[in-house]
Image (tube, rainbow, N blue to C red):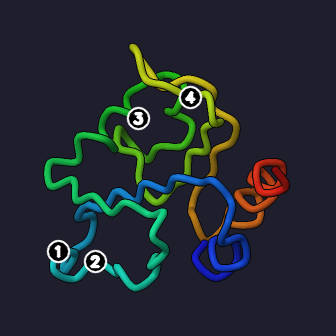
Amino acid sequence: MQDEILAKEPTATLKVYAIWFSMYPGDARAKWPGALLTDARVLHLWDEKRVVGSWFGKHPDYTSLSQGRLLWDAFLLFGPEAHWEDKPTHLISTGRTIVAAREDMRKSLLPFLKK
């Protein structure tokens, strides 16, 4: 995402929320790969209790993406008019794993990068 999208579109109005949490032995807040996303439009969040992944993993609109009852290593693309009430609105695209779905993510973002 950093090299393929953000660096190539420095003026695009985007907000990126990178939510990190431990999934494998050795994962730790001190070891997260912050250098992967260095763009100022990225907000890095550490979710120690996996609250976000658990919510999306259990919510019917997103369970196809989750492994078990936890969503991780996935992207969720919401439109500029998105807001959160009972659930987030204006979902445009999803994919997992992030590496495997990166081309889908790029294609889904294209209409917003052209604005």
Q: Residues within 10 Å of mark 3 (few under 14, many from 20)?
A: some
Residue denoted by label 1: 28
Q: Which of the two discs, 4 and 3, sits closer to the camera?
A: 4
From this view, report whether residue 2 is shown above or below residue 46: below
Of labels 2 and 4, earlier in sequence is: 2
Q: Which residue is mark 3?
A: 56
Up/down of 63 relative to 14, above or below = above
Q: Nearer the viewer, residue 36 or 11?
A: 11
Q: Secondary structure at mark 1?
A: loop
Q: Name which of mark 2 and mark 3 comes first in the sequence.
A: 2
Tally of marks: 4
Q: Which residue bears the numbered disc 4?
A: 82
Disc marking residue 79: none
Q: Which one is in front, 18 or 43?
A: 43
User: Is tag 1's residue or tag 4's residue first in the polypeptide sequence?
Assistant: 1
Closer to the N terminus: mark 4 or mark 3? Answer: 3
Q: Residues within 10 Å of mark 4 (few under 14, many from 20)?
A: few
Q: Gap in Å between the C-alphas at discs 1 and 4? A: 31 Å
Mark 1 vs 3, N-terminal side: 1
Amino acid bearing label 4: Ala
How far separated are the C-alphas under marks 1 and 3? Answer: 21 Å
Describe the element under mark 3 as helix, strand or loop.
helix
Mark 2 or mark 4, whichever is nearer to me: 4
In the rendered image, which residue does mark 2 sit on? 32
Residue for point 34% across, 44% down: 53
Do labels 2 and 1 touch, CB within 8 Å?
Answer: yes
Q: Identify the secondary structure beneath mark 4.
A: loop
Tag in front: 1 or 4 = 4
Residue 93 coordinates in the image, percent (x, y): 69, 42
Q: Residue 31: name its quadrant.
A: bottom left
Mark-to-mark CA distance, 2 and 1: 6 Å
